[in-house]
Amino acid sequence: MKPEEEKSGTVLLVLTGATASGKGALARRVARRLDAEVLSMDSMKVYRGMDVGTAKPGPAARAEVRHHLLDLVEPWEEYDAARWIADAEAARADVEARGRRALFVGGTPLYLKSLLHGIFSGPPADLELRATLLREAEAGGPEALHARLAKVDPASAARLHPSDLRRVVRALEVWEKTGQPSSTLRREWAGDPRPARIAGIRRERSDLDRRIEARVRRMMADGLLEEVARLRGGAALSRGAAGAAGYEELSLHLAGERTLEEAAERTVLRTRQIARRQLNWLRSLRGVRWFDVPPGEEAEVLEEEVARFLE
């Protein structure tokens, strides 16, 4: 890294990994060593009132190290990567203007990719076309729409799960509006990234699975059901907020369509699926320095190594 880049603050410092890998606690320790503040890179922690189910840092953690990019919007508001990038750049400028360092922490792949490469906007939204595609999905199921995407953009179809309806619809929208696969346009857009030091936290699959189940059970004990019930009493969640694991599952329980144990088990399963997608994307990201957490250990054991790499 060039000294002038380091001095000017153009080098991004990033700590990433799958959900439940232990990034948050480790980040606070590393931030203290680096005289840094944490900038959340989590697409669910932006929503106010969604605290338990998103494992948002509480008052004690925020008193320990200053956090940014939390509680930005109400859960019924739409929020996307373009808004996050604008908020992130403003937060980073504020941190660095006070002589501190900004440490981006989180596992949302789109946010990290947007941070490194900028935003891929594609054609403007076509609400009429989107409505048509959503009606198709309702009539034939999301698998039928995903199969349609596989015919015109197999790379995007391989990357997206059929249940990720919002992104499947957007990929088809891009195809219909441009005549080109979204995956091709994204490859053209993703040029050289901004200079960054990226530390990745990695665990064995069985260890991560165990931690995910333990975390979901802890969330249930900490009042996740009550949080979901409170949110159900207000406006409907936005599409983004509704994508957080646990909220739909527990809403179905509250509606009498699932037992509480079934809802908890489905939340564990869905969280594991999210973690798999995060890791699959992160494996394809160049320039990540991976740090392996020993099974059964907390990620804080890597504090010195990670801090030395990011320093």
Image (tube, rainbow, N blue to C red):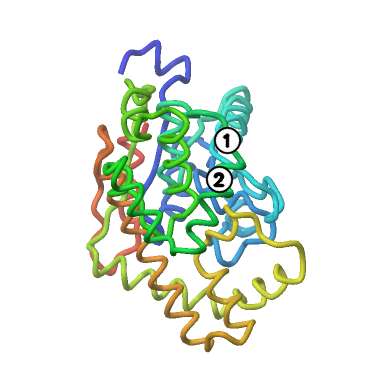
State left or right for residue 90 relative to residue 232: left
Q: Is residue 310 above or below residue 301?
A: above
Name the N-terminal-most of marks 2 and 1: 1
Q: Is residue 57 above or below residue 102?
A: below
Q: Is residue 234 above or below residue 198?
A: below
C-alpha distance separating marks 2 and 1: 8 Å
State left or right for residue 238 relative to residue 81: right
Residue 41: x percent and y percent? 50, 43
State left or right for residue 199 relative to residue 104: left
Q: Residue furthest top?
A: 4
**Residue type at the position of mark 1:** Ala
Residue 30: x percent and y percent? 42, 44
Residue 101: x percent and y percent? 51, 30
**Residue type at the position of mark 2:** Arg
SS for tag 2?
Answer: helix
State left or right for residue 60 relative to residue 210: right
- Answer few, some or many: residues within 10 Å of disc 1's Cα (few below 14, many 20 plus, some between 14 and 19): few
Q: Mark on residue 89?
A: none
Q: Nearer the viewer, residue 256 or 299?
A: 256
Residue 149: x percent and y percent? 35, 47
Which residue sits at x=30%, y=52%? 279
Mark 2 and mark 1 in contact? Answer it, CB < 8 Å. yes
Which residue sits at x=34%, y=31%? 197
Quadrant for the N terminus in the image: top left
- Answer few, some or many: residues within 10 Å of disc 2's Cα (few below 14, many 20 plus, some between 14 and 19): some
Which residue sits at x=65%, y=47%? 78
Residue position marked by numbered label 1 in the rendering:
125
Residue position marked by numbered label 2 in the rendering:
130
Q: Quadrant of residue 11?
A: top left
